[in-house]
Amino acid sequence: MRVPILNGKLPADLLVTLGTDAWGRPVRLTRAAGASLTRLSLLTHLPVGPTTIADSYRDYARQERYWDDPPNAGGLAARPGTSDHGWALALDLRGDLLAWATADEPTMNAHGWFRTIAAELWHWVYDQTRDQHQTPESKDKPMPLTTADLYQIRVVIADEVAKLLRNAEFRLARNQRKTDTPDPWTVVLPAKDGLGPAQARDWLIDARVDVARLVEQVTR
């Protein structure tokens, strides 16, 4: 049975490996993104390896570690299940390739790579629809879903929703001080490391948005 597609849990047969990154991990991308990176390597005469790539595909477990321990990602990690790294479409560049990409952003864009986070100059995301140099052979093919796949996806979504809610309840309970008010949104929360009432409300709204995006991503 095929594994249902989910951010950070992509089937191995959808990925290509192109050497190793600065930490000794395999550089893995979708076929189309990998083909584009190979073309860039040939264009720049720079290898795909430890001196040029800091990160690529990031599985769900590693994204969870980054999210739970922000220093691992400089406090910039995306929530698990929402990172472009989890779709094998993002690269964190370093060294000469980062310097070249920064100096010649139009060429990167023409090959389908775009900076999507202003604060992360090293972070580039591939958009196949905007790659002007792709070939028919390099395009990612859509993966049809069977009834069994859809059932498994529903199970995974239910599990992710439960995790989001447990996380929300934990964060609110951890930060809540005793209060006489019956309104859960007006509780007084520690300022040093907790969420204020408005922030707590916004966080739960964001969690609901994350769930909606998750459903859209795995069912489209």
Image (cartoon, grey):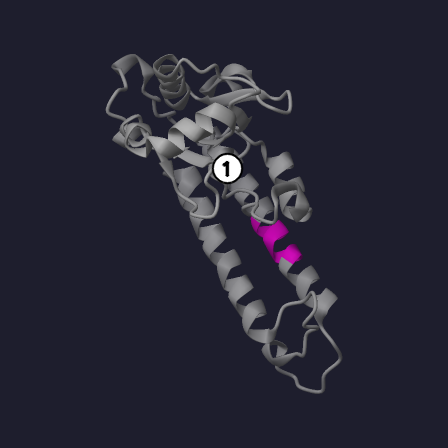
The verdict on residue 106 being magenta is no
| Disc 1 crowd, CA 10 A, few/some/many (<14, 14-19, 20+) | many
Asked if one can make out residue 146 in the rendered structure from this viewpoint, the answer is no
Quarter of the view holding residue 139: top left
Q: Residue at x 74, y 65 (%)?
A: 174
Q: Position of residue 217 (x, y in %)?
A: 42, 41
Predominant SS along the magenta part: helix
Q: Where does residue 112 sit, x and y in percent of width and height?
A: 32, 29
Number of numbered discs on residues = 1
Q: Could one spot residue 140 in this view of the protein?
A: yes
Is 4 located above or below residue 70 in the figure?
above
Mark 1 residue element:
helix
Q: Quadrant of the C terminus?
A: top left
Which residue is at a point 40% across and 27% down the rendered structure image? 100
Instruction: Establish if 141 lies above or below 211.
Output: above
The residue where tag 1 is placed is 153
- Magenta part of the chain: 161-167
Quick check: 200 above or below 40? below
**Residue 33: x, y in percent?**
39, 23
Query: Amino acid under label 1?
Result: Ile
- Work out whether residue 132 or residue 151 is closer to the camera in this orientation and state it: 132
Taking the image as shown, residue 107 lies to the left or right of residue 28, namely left
Q: Is residue 102 left or right of residue 120?
A: left
Say which of 198 and 143 sits in front: 198
Residue 162 among magenta residues = yes
Residue placed most toward the observer, 22 or 139? 22
Q: Residue furthest left?
A: 132
